[in-house]
């Protein structure tokens, strides 16, 4: 089975989130294993519980939730990027618990284990 | 091209240094990979070429001067640094860079070099 790792750098209000989720969901249907999704730059806002996107717009959060629960895909949050944006593991109530708080070293690990690393 | 036999990473820098944190975010990724002995190749194109221009001082606009850290590339074994010649010409910039070892490549060679990597991250 081919292994894919994904780096997300777009925030939840960006349309690139839709592209990213479509990409991941399509890969899963094609029997590609997603070994992890790493959230960097503004993408860490995907983990922010307080982010509210208008209800008639795309709800990336629900898709991440489903991916994590149905396929146990690890969702990694870069703590340096998160801290800068008010998401601190010292105030973990802000952070959606489906995300794992980690550092950039995890991205190196993902890159090494995956057949391909894709940024969206 | 050594497709998939060796995991090579390219980081493409496309943004000017001080208006947003893209350059710093890219630098952090470059240094972390290098510290795991997987030094990436660095590419500078479009407004990204401004990150290489000498005599800039972020402190004048109260921005931490992350460009100074480029001087540590040699220590980190980051040796493959490429800049797009056309991007320099379009901006009327000279090759007065603040670090050495930079290779100025024509758009075609720059693209070829970039595509020889199996992972490209863009900032």
Image (cartoon, grey):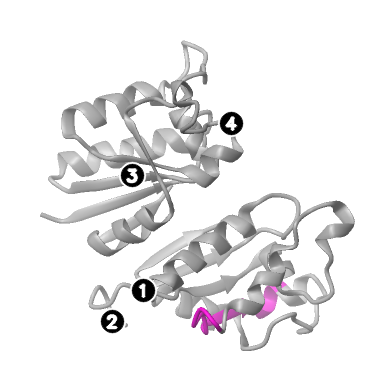
Q: Answer whether labels 2 and 4 touch (C-beta < 8 Å).
A: no
**Chain where mark 2 sits:** B
> Callout 1: helix, strand or loop?
loop
Q: Residue at x 44, y 30 (%)?
A: A47
* First to last magenta residue range: B75-87
Q: Give the residue number, with chain letter if any, for mark 1.
A: B8
Both on one chain, marks 1 and 4? no
Residue B59 position, x and y percent, is: 84, 58
In the picture of the structure, the residue carrying the numbered disc 4 is A86
Q: Residue B19, position in %: x, y?
A: 75, 51
The residue labelled by disc 2 is: B2
Badge nearest the viewer, 1 or 2: 1
Q: Residues within 10 Å of mark 2 (few under 14, many from 20)?
A: few
Residue at image position (46%, 70%) is: B10
In three-dimensional space, the C-alpha distance between marks 2 and 4, rounded to whole angstroms, equals: 42 Å
Left or right? Give the position of B107 relative to A3: right
**Residue B95 against residue A48 in the figure, above or below:** below
Does residue B90 belong to the magenta stretch? no
Disc number lying in front (3 or 2): 3
Q: Around disc 4, counting alpha carbons within 10 Å, would you say few (fewer than 14), some (14 to 19), or many (20 or more)?
A: few
Q: Position of residue B21 (x, y in %)?
A: 65, 51
3D distance between C-alphas at marks 1 and 2: 9 Å
Marks 3 and 2 share the same chain: no
Residue denoted by label 3: A37
Extreme-left residue of the structure: A1
At 25% from the left edge and 73% from the top edge, which residue is drawn? B4
- Chain letter for mark 1, please: B
Q: How far is disc 3 from disc 4 in space, using C-alphas? A: 21 Å
Secondary structure of the residue carrying tag 4 is loop
Tag 1 and tag 2, C-beta contact below 8 Å: yes
Assign the N terminus of chain B to one quadrant of the image: bottom left
């Amino acid at each position: 089975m081919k292994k894919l790792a994904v780096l997300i750098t777009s925030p939840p209000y960006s349309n690139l989130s839709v592209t990213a989720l479509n990409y991941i969901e399509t890969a899963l249907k094609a029997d590609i294993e997603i070994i992890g999704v790493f959230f960097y730059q503004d993408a860490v806002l995907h983990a922010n519980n307080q982010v509210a996107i208008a209800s008639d717009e795309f709800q990336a959060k629900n898709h991440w939730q489903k991916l994590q629960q149905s396929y146990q895909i690890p969702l990694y949050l870069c703590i340096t990027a998160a801290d800068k944006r008010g998401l601190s593991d010292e105030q973990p109530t802000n952070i959606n618990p489906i995300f794992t708080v980690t550092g950039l070293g995890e991205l190196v690990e993902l890159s090494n284990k995956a057949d391909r690393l894709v940024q969206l | 091209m050594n497709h998939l036999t060796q995991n090579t990473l390219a980081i493409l820098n496309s943004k000017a240094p001080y208006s947003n944190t893209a350059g710093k975010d890219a630098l952090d990724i470059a240094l972390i990979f290098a510290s795991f002995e997987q030094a990436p190749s660095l590419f500078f194109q479009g407004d990204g070429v401004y990150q290489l221009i000498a005599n800039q001082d972020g402190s004048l606009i109260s921005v931490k001067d992350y460009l100074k850290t480029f001087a540590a590339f040699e220590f980190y074994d980051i040796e493959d640094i490429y800049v797009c010649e056309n991007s320099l010409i379009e901006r009327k910039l000279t090759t007065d860079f603040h670090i050495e070892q930079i290779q100025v490549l024509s758009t075609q060679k720059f693209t070829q070099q970039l595509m020889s990597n199996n992972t490209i991250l863009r900032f």
